[in-house]
Image (cartoon, grey):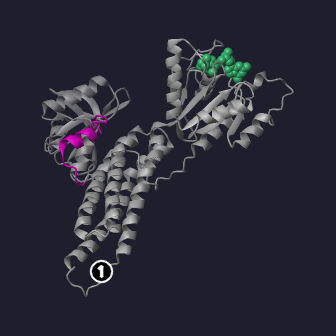
């Protein structure tokens, strides 16, 4: 029901100030009924000082902001009450509001109303949740671009092109018996369709970057037992996260944590050291190491002495398809006269075109250079708020389906199918793309699914 009036705390409990949000037809009347002065004549976008009153007693000294439809976040009459952040006060005010006829809002219900009232499209509404959840510069930029309509405007351009293609094909159909009329060249239409498909595919491809930025780029730390993997994890996290000991096989399970390097989140995964073992638990741990390698984008292979050429080749064999950085640890315990800069190891690595670094996880030597190497290995394109990057699985799914429909259009065109057969797939492409902005979505189930991931009060 969209015409009831909802309320919810909009701030986390425990701050100096707590804000309660109310939205709906009765928002101003209900707020007025618990406020020390009359708000029903309040001008739009005004702030009022006074008290929240219950049975003639003041509960708190507050500021009340009043917004009139359609100029509010939800597009409805809305009120925000700024109280002191006490849990007691906030609960009391909410209780009074419910007594006066408000309903407690579901998660994301304010934003859902903003969408249903046409204040934003669905991709922008989703960006609100991403903006709140953003933890670093990259995720902030992505959410901001989406909120400002980045995806929506890219899709609007695609829509224009698809409509043009559809109408040109329809023209062929309508006048196909007029032999003397000339139509747009089929090869031109094919170019147009290819151009649309390229754009759709590129957007879908950006999902990989979007996912990596959102969840952190997975970096597995692997190698034989006792080489200092867990010490390295702790050093990178600047935290005593994993147990370190000189016993071989200390780490039995994968241990994950994230840090930001230059505004990008990396998810480091410390793993059980690789060795032959008969221990059942350790075996399971080692299986998990291989799973971690599979899932990682970057693998840091740690060794504690110069590898032989065959060892190096063995490592390269195991890490196919991943970005590999070989790390020789424990340089602090290397003999004084060993040349740290130029070794056979370095020469070999450059022969195999692999990055290699010498560090001491114990003293911190070489860690800064390692962080730079990890950042470079991630190969993240620099992102500005104007770049459109897909970070939602729902959008990715729609783009993949749109690409499939477009493929059928392209195949049909090369097979010179008639326009009416192509039109159906073109219509499906349009429908699928408009799922992203919410043009076609009306079922409660789909909307409910999207908005339950929001926090209450947003
Ligand atoms: N001298 C020196 N010792 C180190 C360094 N890094 C780790 N160690 C020592 O090497 C031993 C093993 O370190 P861990 O970090 O537990 O090694 P690991 O690779 O996680 O070992 P497993 O979990 O058994 O696979 C410990 O005694 C560490 O103190 C280093 O840079 N220099
Ligand atoms: Mg360990």
Q: Nearer the viewer, residue 458 or 205?
A: 205
Dot 1 surroundings within 10 Å: few (below 14), some, or many (20 or more)? few
Looking at the magenta stretch, what is its main secondary structure? loop
From the top left corner, tell me how far across and down residue 268 is, in percent: 54, 30
Ligand 2 location (quadrant):
top right
Residue 436 lies, with reference to residue 424, above or below; the image says above
Quarter location, residue 304: top right
Question: Seen from this angle, which residue lies furthest right?
Answer: 337
Side of 142 where 180 appears, left or right:
left
From the top left corner, tell me how far across and down residue 99 is, in percent: 13, 30
Residue 256 visible, this angle? yes
Q: Nearer the viewer, residue 118 or 382?
A: 382
Instruction: Say which residue appears at 71% left-offset and 31% top-offset.
Output: 310
Q: Is residue 441 magenta?
A: yes
From the top left corner, tell me how far across and down residue 317 is, in percent: 61, 35
Instruction: Say which residue appears at 35% left-offset and 52% top-offset.
Output: 399
Q: Quadrant of the N terminus?
A: top left
Side of 191 where 41 appears, left or right:
left
Q: Quadrant of the C terminus?
A: top left
Side of 142 where 240 appears, left or right:
right
Q: How many marks?
A: 1
Q: Nearer the viewer, residue 252 or 80?
A: 252
From the top left corner, tell me how far across and down residue 251 is, in percent: 56, 17
Please provide the residue range marked out in magenta: 439-458
Q: What kind of element bears circle 1?
A: loop
Residue 435 lies, with reference to residue 100, above or below; the image says below
Instruction: Say which residue appears at 30% left-offset and 55% top-offset.
Output: 433
Residue 367 visible, this angle? no
Quarter location, residue 307: top right
Q: Is residue 335 magenta?
A: no
Q: Circle 1 sits on which residue?
A: 183
Instruction: Say which residue appears at 60% left-offset and 27% top-offset.
Output: 222
């Amino acid at each position: 029901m969209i015409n009831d009036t909802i309320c919810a705390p909009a701030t986390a409990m425990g701050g100096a100030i707590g804000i309660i949000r109310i939205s709906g037809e009765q928002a101003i009347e209900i707020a007025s009924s618990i406020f020390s002065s009359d708000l029903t004549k309040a001008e739009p976008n005004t702030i009022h000082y006074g008290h929240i009153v219950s049975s003639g007693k003041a509960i708190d000294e507050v500021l009340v902001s009043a917004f009139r439809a359609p100029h509010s976040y939800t597009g409805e009459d809305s009120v925000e009450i700024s109280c002191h952040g006490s849990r007691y006060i906030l609960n009391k005010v909410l209780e009074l509001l419910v007594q006066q006829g408000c309903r407690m809002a579901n998660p994301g219900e304010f934003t859902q109303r903003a969408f249903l009232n046409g204040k934003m499209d669905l991709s922008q509404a989703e960006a609100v949740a991403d903006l709140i959840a953003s933890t670093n510069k990259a995720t902030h930029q992505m959410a901001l671009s989406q909120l400002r309509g980045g995806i929506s405007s890219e899709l609007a351009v695609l829509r224009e092109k698809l409509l043009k293609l559809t109408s040109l094909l329809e023209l062929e159909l309508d006048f196909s018996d007029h032999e003397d009329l000339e139509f747009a060249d089929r090869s031109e239409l094919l170019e147009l369709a290819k151009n649309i498909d390229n754009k759709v595919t590129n957007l879908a491809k950006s999902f990989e970057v979007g996912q990596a930025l959102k969840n952190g780029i997975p970096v597995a730390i692997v190698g034989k037992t006792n080489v200092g993997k867990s010490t390295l994890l702790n050093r990178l996290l600047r935290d005593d996260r994993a147990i370190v000991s000189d016993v071989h096989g200390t780490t039995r399970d994968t241990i994950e944590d994230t840090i930001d390097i230059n505004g990008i989140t990396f998810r480091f995964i410390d793993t059980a050291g690789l060795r032959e073992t008969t221990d059942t638990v350790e075996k399971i741990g080692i299986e998990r190491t291989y799973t971690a390698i599979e899932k990682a984008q970057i693998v840091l292979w740690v060794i504690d002495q110069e590898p032989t050429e065959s060892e190096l080749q063995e490592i390269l064999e195991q890490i196919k398809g991943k970005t590999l950085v070989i790390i020789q640890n424990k340089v602090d315990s290397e003999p004084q006269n060993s040349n740290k800069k130029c070794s056979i190891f370095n020469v070999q690595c450059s022969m195999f075109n692999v990055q290699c670094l010498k560090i001491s996880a114990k003293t911190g030597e070489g860690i800064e250079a390692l962080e730079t190497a990890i950042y470079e290995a991630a190969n993240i394109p620099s992102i500005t708020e104007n770049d459109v990057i897909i970070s939602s699985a729902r959008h990715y799914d729609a783009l993949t389906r749109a690409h499939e429909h477009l493929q059928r259009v392209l195949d049909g065109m090369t097979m010179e199918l008639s326009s009416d057969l192509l039109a159906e797939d073109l219509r499906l492409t349009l429908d699928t793309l408009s799922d992203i902005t919410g043009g076609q979505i009306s079922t409660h189930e789909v909307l409910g699914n999207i908005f339950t991931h929001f926090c209450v009060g947003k």
